């Protein structure tokens, strides 16, 4: 295989470092809630849709790569605003499930529209053909890294919150 030119190697390194460090997320948050609250509501929503069972605070912390303390404050605020409620698990009195209220479900629907708008703008900006090509390429990169890890040539480092 031909060697990758130094300029191209550096561009790969720079782009991958930027994705890792910068973590751009669309700041979609309906009026009255913070982006952190919006992220928690969205996480609960997609977890429910995926059928993951009772959603517990530590799952949100892990999924959003946040500390349990930070998520606890966010959930407290969402509960005070009436967007979620906590239900005790019968098997373990310490464990709670998070459930969206009717207001929380309405906010989740609004968030869905906002995310759709954001990704529509992204698709419009890069074009459908380039977006499809990018997805195929990123999936190949991921497959390559998984194969390298399986072969013992690469180590997978989990995020400390996981």
Image: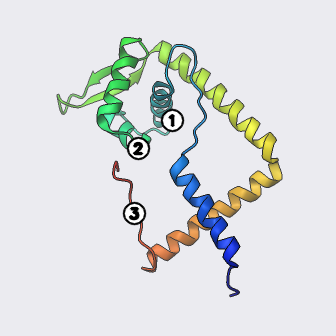
The label nearer to you, 2 versus 1, is 2
Q: Could you tell me which residue is drawn at 82 percent across and 53 percent down?
A: 129
Per the rendering, the mark at residue 65 is 2
Secondary structure at badge 2 equals loop
Q: Could you tell me which residue is drawn at 67 percent across and 77 percent down?
A: 6
* Colour scheme of the rendered structure: rainbow
Question: Would you say 113 lies left or right of 36 here?
Answer: right
Q: Nearer the viewer, residue 92 or 119?
A: 119
Work out which residue is located at the far bottom of the displayed protein and give it.
Answer: 1
| Residue at mark 3 to residue at mark 2: CA–CA distance | 14 Å
Q: Could you tell me which residue is drawn at 45 percent across and 74 percent down?
A: 154
Q: Earlier in the sequence, mark 1 or mark 3?
A: 1
Q: Earlier in the sequence, mark 2 or mark 1?
A: 1
| Residue at mark 2 to residue at mark 1: CA–CA distance | 16 Å
The label nearer to you, 1 versus 3, is 3
* Residue 117 spot, x, y in % from top left: 71, 30
Quadrant of the image occupied by residue 80: top left
- 41 in relation to 107, above or below: below
Q: Earlier in the sequence, mark 3 or mark 2?
A: 2
Secondary structure at badge 1 equals helix
Q: Which residue is tagged 3?
A: 157
Quadrant of the image occupied by residue 61: top left
Per the rendering, the mark at residue 108 is none
- 141 in relation to 92, above or below: below
* Residue 29 spot, x, y in % from top left: 56, 23
Question: In the rendered structure, are the residues bearing label 3 and label 2 in contact, judged by CB atoms less than 8 Å apart?
Answer: no
Crowding at dot 1, Cα within 10 Å, few <14 / some 14-19 / many 20+, comes out as: few
- 131 in relation to 13, above or below: above
Q: Which residue is tagged 1?
A: 46
Crowding at dot 3, Cα within 10 Å, few <14 / some 14-19 / many 20+, comes out as: few
Quadrant of the image occupied by residue 12: bottom right
């Amino acid at each position: 295989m031909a060697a990758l030119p130094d300029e191209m190697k550096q561009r790969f390194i720079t782009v991958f470092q930027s994705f890792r460090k910068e973590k751009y997320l669309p700041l979609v948050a309906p009026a009255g809630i913070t982006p952190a609250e919006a992220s928690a509501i969205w996480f609960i929503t997609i977890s429910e849709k995926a059928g993951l069972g009772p959603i517990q605070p530590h799952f949100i912390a892990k999924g959003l790569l946040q500390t349990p303390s930070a998520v606890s404050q966010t959930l407290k605020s969402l509960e005070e605003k009436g967007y979620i409620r906590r239900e005790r698990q019968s098997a373990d009195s310490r464990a709670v499930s998070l459930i969206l209220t009717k207001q929380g479900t309405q906010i989740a629907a609004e968030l869905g529209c906002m995310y759709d708008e954001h990704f529509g703008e992204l698709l419009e900006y890069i074009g459908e053909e380039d977006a499809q090509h990018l997805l195929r390429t990123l999936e190949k990169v991921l497959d390559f890294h998984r194969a390298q890890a399986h072969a013992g040539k690469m180590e997978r480092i989990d995020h400390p919150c996981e």
